[in-house]
Image (spheres, rainbow, N blue to C red):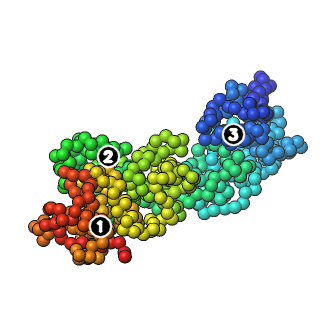
Amino acid sequence: MKFFKHLLVLLVFSIIFIPMSGEAKQRFTDVGEHHAAKKEIHYLAQQQIISGYSNGKFGVNDSITRLQASTMLVRALKLPTTNRPDPKLKDIPRTHPGFTTISTVVDAGIMTGKKDGTFAPYDSLTRAQMASILVRAFDLNQSSDIVFHDINATHWATPDVQTLYAHNITTGYPDGTFRPNAPITRSHFSVFLARVLEPKFQLEKVCYAPATETKHIVNVAVTTLWSKPNIARIVDRPAISNPVDLASWTKQMTHQQKLSLLGKVDTQALYGQEVTILDEKDNWYKVAVHEQFSPVQREGYPGWVPKSHIAKQESNVNACDVTIVTANKTMLRHLDGKPFREISFNTMLPVVKEDAKRIYVKTPTDGTKYIVKEHAVTTPSFAHLPKPTAEDLVATSKQFLDLPYLWAGTSAYGFDCSGFTYSIYKQHGILIPRDSTVQATHGVAVAKKDLQVGDLLFFAHQQGKGAIHHVSMYIGNGKMIHSPDYSKPIEIVPITSEPYQSEYAGARRYLAQ
């Protein structure tokens, strides 16, 4: 009976691992043209390191066993298997079909038996074990100080994982984990092995690493900040869902419903923007939006947002270049070109790499996506954005002519008056206060007779003597551009037109001359 059992194991083992030759035999039915590991798997097949199952499949999602991994390594390294000493493993007698392979990897110091004296040839190989055997098999010795969330400095496999990272073999998962105890699949092991054997498969150097400190990031295209939690109306559901649908929200509201947003919402934050969590209640966070100055909150402009709109940043992206969206809107796409998420003007994301047509970005929680290059500009950091000319500010502002008004808006789905001026300046690397009342007290005061293009103009109740209620930007020739109110879209008008002539309250300059 034992004879037939070993014969059956030998037969299955042979079917899986008899090398294939010829291009036609490398086409596995479960490795399609767009499979992520296609090139690496076919490379290993051409090198006669691996083959598929008798049914024509490779078994891309099957966990690789310790014996299968051993066989791949023996073939990859072209190790002689004769005259190897008996490893004296309880479950690997000389009659075992994998005896010569296992005795070879044990004798070569690539793999060892377990504490109980067995090899467990049919157990799944874990990702931590994969790291260790690849480092030993190929004598990899470069190291790094990378730290993954789930594998601390004292973990037995940490040095080996850090070595694979240093050799551009792995970067872990998008959420900053390595998952050391997870079984590794046949396709993933093939990818890692191919990267060791052939430099063209190695990962490009990346600018990001697993996050070592907690940062909270907006994880929807645009989140709207509410004055209180749980006050959104039924009509506001597109703005508080995940994903959000700002286009539908602004389109379906009646004029009166839009007017009723006054006092309910205060500002907006864009995808990828950092926030500080100040408080929480039910399914809402009170957050402060970084880069939106407010005199009432040191961390940034405060307000309440749905918890589902906020995520922990998975990666430290401080070393990455950034891209800022210059188009009114653009589509963020999966690597296969399928739409992922529409994002707004001024959305800023870390750059992974660029090519002639695309900018690849690191999203907060969904890995790498891309946008078309003509819709954004890349810079080493926000601070490195070139300072604009007055004409630059005017050209950017005119992109939004005829865009309907939205109270609290800071996105291309609608701006309020100060959200418009704030966003135009931010596009060019200049952060000004978020609200018109605060914009009117910063910058440099300018007399009306000395107005220059790019200056902000302020308007107040009581014939310009009362509280500031509106802001516009001077564009020259006695004209200004502004987002007036729900009665009109963004427009250009003479500064002498009413009620602005009567309510003029002063001007401020934020653009250095």
Q: Is residue 244 or residue 427 the one in the foreground?
A: 427
In the figure, is residue 92 to the left or right of 383? Answer: right
Q: Who comes first in sequence, dot 1 or dot 3?
A: 3
- Identified at 70% across, 46% down, the residue is 194
Q: Who comes first in sequence, dot 1 or dot 2?
A: 2
Disc 3 vs disc 2: which is toward the camera? 2
- Provide residue 148's location: percent of width, then percent of height: 55, 56
Disc 1 vs disc 2: which is toward the camera? 1
Secondary structure under badge 3? Answer: helix
Spatial distance from mark 1 to mark 3, Cα to Cα? 63 Å
Residue located beneath label 1 in the image: 476
Residue located beneath label 3 in the image: 41
Q: Amino acid at mark 2?
A: Leu
Spatial distance from mark 1 to mark 2, Cα to Cα? 33 Å
| Proximity of marks 1 and 2: CB atoms separated by less than 8 Å | no
Spatial distance from mark 3 to mark 2, Cα to Cα? 43 Å
The quarter of the picture where the C terminus appears is bottom left
Residue located beneath label 2 in the image: 246
Q: Who comes first in sequence, dot 3 or dot 2?
A: 3
- Provide residue 268's location: percent of width, then percent of height: 31, 55
Instruction: Categorize mark 3 by other alpha carbons within 10 Å: few (<14), some (14-19), many (20+).
Output: many
Disc 1 vs disc 3: which is toward the camera? 1
In the figure, is residue 107 to the left or right of 299? Answer: right
Secondary structure under badge 2? Answer: helix
Q: Amino acid at mark 1?
A: Gly
